Each structure stands twice: as structure tokens, then as C-alpha cells.
Amino acid sequence: MGNIIQTEKLCKNFKVGSNEVAVLKDIEIHIESGDFVSIMGPSGSGKSTLLYLLGGIDEPSSGQVYIQGKDINRMKDKEKSILRRRTLGFVFQFYNLVQNLTVEENIMLPVTMDKKKTADFQEQLDEILEIVGLSERRKYTPRELSGGQQQRVAIARALILSPALILADEPIGNLDSKTGTEIMELFHRINQEKGITIVQVTHSEEAAAYGNRLIRMKDGEVVEPILV
Amino acid sequence: MKIVLKHVMKNIFEKKLRSVIVILTILLSTLILFIGLSLNTIINQTYTKMLQGSYGTSNIVVTKSTDDGNPFYESKNLDVDGIELEQRLDMIQAKGKTTIQDDDVNVSLYGMDADAAEEMELLESVPGDNVLTGNEVIISQRTASEHKLEIGNSIKVVQATNTYHFTVVAISKPNGIYYSEMGDILLIATREKINELYGLEDMVSSTLLKVTDEGMEEAITSLQETNEGLVVQKSSSADTMMRDEQTFQTVMLLAIIIIVLISAYVISSLSKLILTERMPVLATFRSVGAHKGMMNRVLLLEFLVYGIIGAGLGIALAMILLPFAADIFNEYKQYGVETVVEYNVIYLAISIAFGVLFPAFISILRIIRTNAKPLKEVLFNTSFTPEKHSKWTVISGIILLGIAFILYVVNQYNDLLLAVLSLLLLFVSIVILMPTLLNGLSQLLRLLSRKRISGEFQLGIKNIANNKIVANNVSMVMVVFLLLLMVGISSTGIDQYVTKTLSKDFDVAVSLTEKNLGLANDISGMDGVSKSYLQTISIGKSTMNGVARSFGVYGVEDFDKVDEFYDGIRYIDLDENRLQNLDNPIIVDIYYAEQHGIEIGDTVNIQPVDINYEPFNDLEPIEFIVSGTMDSSGFGSSRDSALIPMGIYEEQFAGLFYELALKLEEEFNPDEVKSRIADTYSNYSLEVITFDEMLGAQKGTIDTLIDGITIIIGLGMIVGILGISNNLMVSFNQRKKEYAVLYSVCMSKMQIVKMVFVETLITFIAVIIIGLLGGLALNLLLTKLLHAVGMVTEFRFTFELYGILCGVVAILLIVSTLSLVRKVFQLNIMKELRYE
């Protein structure tokens, strides 16, 4: 299998007062299609920063990020947004749903923004709702759902355009352990059944165990890439 | 507490832009409130000062009853025995003409003891000789500077066929009696000299008396009893000059209410902005042990500090600006009447209390609501604001709207309170129904644009329906829009009344101090006068259907002649039989007849009253039989006129006003006739005015009023614009996360910008549609309110004004959206998505 993600000398510096702090230092990683990768490390190690750089939401200070062989930092904003819609799916710790839209409207957002007809995606919607177990709650708004259910909506939104890659930032960090396990099993199922590459940032060893690969980070550097 | 206060102050200084906006809003609203409240008193005092100028410190004025055609009496004939006089001044008046630098100028000559006049504050000589002899006169500083006259100069005055030469020996400040100079030249000479002009000796035309305030009523009664043939009045009621004080008060009050409403809305939205920004600090305080009550007090303290700074600056600025603002409204400035600026302590206290407490008062509910949220929600700022379409909200909005119109319908007698309540309910219902209206608009647009528009457009349309913040923005814009429309409709209506509704019912009008038929006939017989009508007017009170009304009661010799003479008086329905055969017929205005369900043949009781609205001569109400209806808008905007036969009028009513209206033959110039009347009857105390002058004066008053209101509303608009901008800032702050989420999952920043533009466009469409419907409803309800305050004229919804306001809103929305666009492009997505 080829690399879906590749980074070259990826650096990210932040300004703190008058000082420049290096958050990521020359990161070089390769992630193959179909992998389920967990990035772990202590707070401040730069794992979330890395995830957002991989998703093109943040821009590196230097170095490159290749998604399916394309340098995303050479892309214009519009191209990046197309990439985020069609190739990537993001899942956040705090779900980040649009509160004034219903479950199905939230899920269909990438479709709507991609100028595709929502009617053409009804089957996928039904299937995904079935997978995440929210078929009965499709007309609810996020505030009427529990945390776990909201995270399921976020996952469904990430899946609707059948992306090649899902980036998840502490997806179970805000959930109780039972719900967390359910979500991780859902991720595992998606990875196994649909072959979607998943990269998650997590503090939980248990959550990391669902993946096939672990990247440990410390002080902005990759410590040990391990195959599970 | 010290730490908390330090924190509050630091926060105010650190957030400079926000603090400036908050303080500026409080400053402007306090300033407008103080100036608005003060203006009416200042204008009244200025007006009183001008009136008092003619009478100085005197409190009784004695004139001659001119039944015998002679306006003079001998000074010694005024019997003041038994009256404890503090001051006395005898005066005699004459008129003439002079030519200065090729200009013909009217001259008023007053004969009096200049020393006594100065003591009575009728004049105030700057160094010069007050003791006049022979041909010596005193002029005013205004005359001296306008006509370049100095002490020692000579003035040639022509009276009838005689010419007199006077020498200026003193110059007075343009106060007191000189307020009435009004473009003419007023010369003060000796009484002997003026008597000489008439070929008389020791005659006077009026006497001013000063007695103690306590003894005044008794003195007047005594003087009236012992001086038959002389008219004895209080100085304060001697001048019958009318001023439309109520209109001014009403419009000013309306302006203040509007400013207060706009300010309340703005401060409310500001509190939202502040609380949004303060959420993390709130959480920090609470996480280290501060309880909710303590946090409520901290936030209230912050609003109080803003209030103190804003109100302090506002009051300071208002005190500096008040003299200038008051000067704009001083209609008598051209006559040298200085604006009487007094800083009213009560208004000062009200304005300070408003500025200091209002922000805290308006924010208190929001503060409590914010602090009532669970700590986690506050700490992580995870509370969201989707718009909920509760059916109860919609129902209550519809009910309130219904009540507003029901009140309009049931308010048959134009009760002010009901009219205000009805208008208020309209505003409240519009705000409550706004989300529903926007939802409807959104659904309609979705239906119209189905499958044909891109995702960001669809999302923008959905946001209008579902997003509480967007709905709040539209509500804010709508409320300010409708409030400004309200002022516009009122001002335009009043202006229209003056310029278009007032018919040209006379060319020249002569105000008489009493009913002098001989004089009226003489003037009516002058060359150029084609028609004349002598109006005799008094006041009556009546209670109809439990509602107390006052009327201008006109004594009429011949009802047909009134109709024939006045174009502005139109008979609607007459019962000739009753009018001719009854002793007590009355013609009432159709406006009141319809209001009270009065029909021809009905009985109305009218209580004659004096100028102070007290029963005249303790008379009982008089019964009248309604014998006709009319449209009397030509007599006054309040349409509270009633016509009764002269016989019953003379028997029962106080003769308060007499005005001889003259129509001229086409070839005669009103100004020339006016001048001729003034010259010919210079020894009578007549006020002569042409229709154009009257219209100009009324128009001038209204223009001044409208200018002032425009300034206030302009300031109100600044407050409103600040509020709308703030709302948009709040909106951006609250929606930053939403934008970041959309960016992270599916949208480019350009798509977000397009979505924001769609929201702006729909907001504008909503303003156009709801503004039009709301404006039409407002026009209807507002008309009732204005009728309730005596402006019974047509108030029209003007598309011109509506268009201007739509244009202003469009510009405002575009400017605000452009600033949002910049912010969207600069948005720190990572910060909003909150990762470590």
C-alpha cells in the first residue's frame, strides 16, 4: 500500500511573548493507506499540532505535508477546503457540530458545500446513520443529544463523502469510558470495513490499542514509531 | 474587594475599543437625555423672559378700555388709593417712521420716566444719561450697532405729517422692553414729549404697577372696583401671544423615549458582548471558589463603573453643549432675547442616575442568566444559542400584536396611555415575532431557490431561520429602523400640516386687546380690504362619555359667514332649522363628533372657563344642542373648535382673544396694508401680521423643532449604529467557533464569507419587508398617539423616508459585513477549535 500521509522536516514554531517556541521539530512520518494510527504523548508534546497540520487547518513554519502525494501547503484555501471535504474527515474532542442544524443537516454539510445534490446522498446518509446508530434522531439538534451521540454525528459527518482519511483529535477525551469504548469500536469497524485510514490523537492507552500503529511524541519530536 | 475593583478597572483599560464603545453609548444617551429634558424648561424660561421684558418686575398692568375710541387716560385718573405700591410706571406709546441709510424703518416711541423704567428692569442703560428732557431719547445697543448710531446722533421721526428730531443721549442693553423691538427701532422718550406728539397733556396708555405678590389678587380686585373704564390684569396673563408648547413637549418627549429605547437596546447588546468576553474570567473566579452571587456583583460593579465613567463624561459634555443646543431652539434670538440656560438639578440627577444605573439595570437579567450556567459550560464556553421556535412564543407574539390593534380600535377617545401602550406592544410583538418572521422568510427563500443555489447560500438562508444571534441582529436593526421611522413620520406630518393643511384664510390679521367693534369696522373699511371677519374666541370645558375635553369656543354672529370667509373651516353637516331657531345651537368638529358618537340633535354641556382654565365667573356648564358638524383644521391642529351664537357667547364666556381677519383685493400688497394699519392706528396696541408672516413664524417654529429633533435623532442614530455594530461584533465573537468548525470540516474562508454576505442580504430583505409592514402598522398606531396629543392631522407613511432608512441600513450592513469579512479571513481557526 502507498503512503497516504508523508511529512518532510515538518516544523512548527509559536511565539510566546517575545520568544519563539518550537512545538514540532523536523517531523518525518509516513502513514500508509488503511492504517489506524494513534499519536500519543504528554501534554505540550505537539501531537494535536501535528494532527491539525496534517489536516491543513494549520500551516507549518517549515517543511512539507503530503496527502496522497500532494503538498497541501502549496494548495490555495479553496483547494484545501475541497481536500478537507472529499479526502479528509475531522473528528474533534468537543464534537464541533453546528448547533443550529439538525443531525442530518450537520452530516450533509460537506455534501452541500461540495455543490452536490443532497438527494443523491440519501442512501449513504441512511447507511451512515445506521452505522452510528442515530437513525431515530436524524431530526434532532446537537443540544438534544448526549456527548456520545454528538460524537457519532461528528463521525458520520466525517464519513459522508467516503474520505480516505479520518483525523480525530482526542475523540473520546470528553466521553465516559463506556461511550468511549463504543466510539473506538465504531472507528475500528470503519477502519476494517471501509478501509479508511484513521489517525487519532489520544492520551488513552486503551484507545491507542484499537490502532495498528503508535507514534509517540515528546517535546515536539517523534520518539518511537511502533507497529502494534 | 480591592482586587476585584482593580481587575474591573484593568479590564476596562485593557479592552480599549470595547470600553470606548460602551462608554460612548452611555455618554451619548446620558447627554441626549439631559439636553432633551432641559430644553423644554429652557425654552419656556426664555419665552417667559421675553414676555416679562414688556412688563419688567411689575405684576399688574392697567390699560384703557377703548369702547369710546380713545386709548388714553389721565395718569391722575388711576385711583390707587389703599394699594400698597412698590413701584409705578406710566407709559404712553406712539408710532412713526424714520429713514436711516435710505432704509424706511418703523419707530415705536415710548414715553416714560427712564429712571423708574430702569428700576422696573425695563431697560438697562450702559453709561449714558437716563434723565431725559425735551427731544432726548434712549436707544438699544442693537439699534446702535445695526444703524451705526452713537450718543449725540440725531434721529428724524415722521409721524403723520409732522417731523420730529430726537437726540440719542443713552444706550440701553437690548433687554426688557427692547425685546419687543423686533426689527423696528424703539425709542424711549419723556412722557411729555409723546403727549406733545398727540397734542395731549399728562395722558398715558398703560400703567405698570408692582405690589407685593401676596397682595396682588386683592390689589387687582380693588383696582377693578375703583377704576371703571380701565382694564386691570396680571402682567403674566396680559399678553395673549400663543405658543405651541405642547407640540414641542410632545415631540421632545417622543425623541427622548426613542433615545432611551435605542440606548436600552444598545446597552443590552453591549452587555451581551461584555459577558461573552468575560465568560472565561467568570469561570476562573468561580473555579477558585467565588459563588454565583459574588460573580453577579462583580459584573454589576463593572457595569456600574462603565456607567459612572460614561454618565460623568456625558453630563460634563451635556453641560458644555446645553447652551449651544438651547440656542438652536431660541426662536427669539433675533429679537435679542438671550437664551436662559439653567442647569436643573432634578434633570441632572435623573440623567446621572440613568447613565450610572441603566447599564447595570439592563444587564442584570443577562448577568444572572450567564452566572446561572453550570461551571463547566462557562469554563469551556460550550453554551450555544440556536434559535428555538417555541409555539408559545409565537402565540404570545401574535396575541400582543392583536392586543396592540385591539387597543387601537377600542381607543375611541384617543387616550394617550392606551395609544402609548398600543405602540409599545407593537414593538414588543415585532421583536417576539422576529424569529418566526425570519423563519417564514427563510422557508420562502428556500422554496424559491431549491436546488439552484450553492451550499453556502443554502446555509446562509438556514442561519437566518435557525440562528438566534442572526435573529437578534435583525431585531436590533428593525427596532432602530422603526423608531427612526416613527420620528420621521411625526416630523413630516407636522411639517405637512403647517405647509399644506393650513389654508390661506386671511391676508392680514389684526389682534385686538378687546372687542372694539368701532375699530374693527374702521380697519375693515380701509382701502384694499375686500372682506373681514372678527373672531371672538374663548375657552370651554366639557366632559363627553366620561372624557374631559377643552374647546376653543368661537362666538359667531352668522354661521354662513364663517363658512364663506374661512376656507380652512368646512361644514360637514348642518341643521339649518336648529341653527336659526334655537338659542343654544353649537357646531362641533366632526373629529370629536365621530369620536364621541355625537349626532345632530344631541346635547352637550360646556363649562366656560378663564385663561387659567378655571370656571369663568363661577358659571355652571351651559347646555348646547348640536346643530352641525365641521372640519375646523383651519383654526388649529387639535381640531378642538366649536362655534356658538354670539349672544350666548357674550353672556356666558370670557372674551379672551379677538382677531380681525382681513382678505385683500388682489392688487393690494399685504405688507403695505399691514404697514398702513400699524401707522393709522399707532396709538392702539395692535398686533398686525400677514398670512405669510404667520406661516413663516409657524414654519420657522416647526423647522427649528425639526432641526433640533433631527440633531437628537442623529445622535440617537449614532447610538443605534454603535449598537448594531456591537451586535455584529457580539455576533462574530459568538460565531467564531461556528466559522472555525465549518472551516475545519467543509468550507473555505471564501465560502464562509459568501455565507455571511447571504445572511446580510437576507437581513436587508427582512428589513425591507418587515420594515414596510411594521412601518404601515406603526403609521396607523402612531397616528392615534399623535391625535391624542392634539396633532389631529394626516400622518402618512412616506416611501421617501422609508427608502432613505433602507439605504442607511444597507450602508450600515455592508460596512459591518466588510469588517466581518476581514475578521473571518484573520480568524485563528486553531484557537477556536481549542486544542492543546
Image (cartoon, helix red, strand yellow):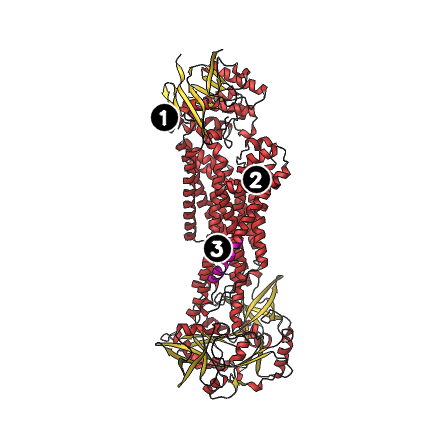
Q: In the rendered image, is residue A166 in sight?
A: yes
Q: Chain of mark 2?
A: B
On the image, numbered disc 2 is attached to which residue? B7
Residue A163 visible in the shown view: no
Q: How crowded is the residue under tag 1: few (<14 C-alpha within 10 Å), some, or many (20+)?
A: few
Q: Quadrant of residue B41?
A: bottom right
Residue B325 within the magenta-colored segment of the rendering: yes
From the image, tell me which residue sits under label 3.
B712
Q: Mark 2 packing: few (<14 Cα in 10 Å), some, or many (20+)?
A: some
Q: Are marks 1 and 2 in contact (CB under 8 Å)?
A: no
> Which range is magenta?
B315-328
In this rendering, is residue B621 above or below B394? below
Q: Which-is-in-front pick, marks 1 and 2?
A: 2
Q: Quadrant of the N terminus of chain A?
A: top left
The answer to which of B128 and A187 lies nearer the viewer is B128
Instruction: Kindly report the secondary structure that dominates the magenta region of the rendered protein.
Output: helix
Please indicate whether residue B666 sits to the left or right of residue A52 in the image. left
Circle 1 residue: A75
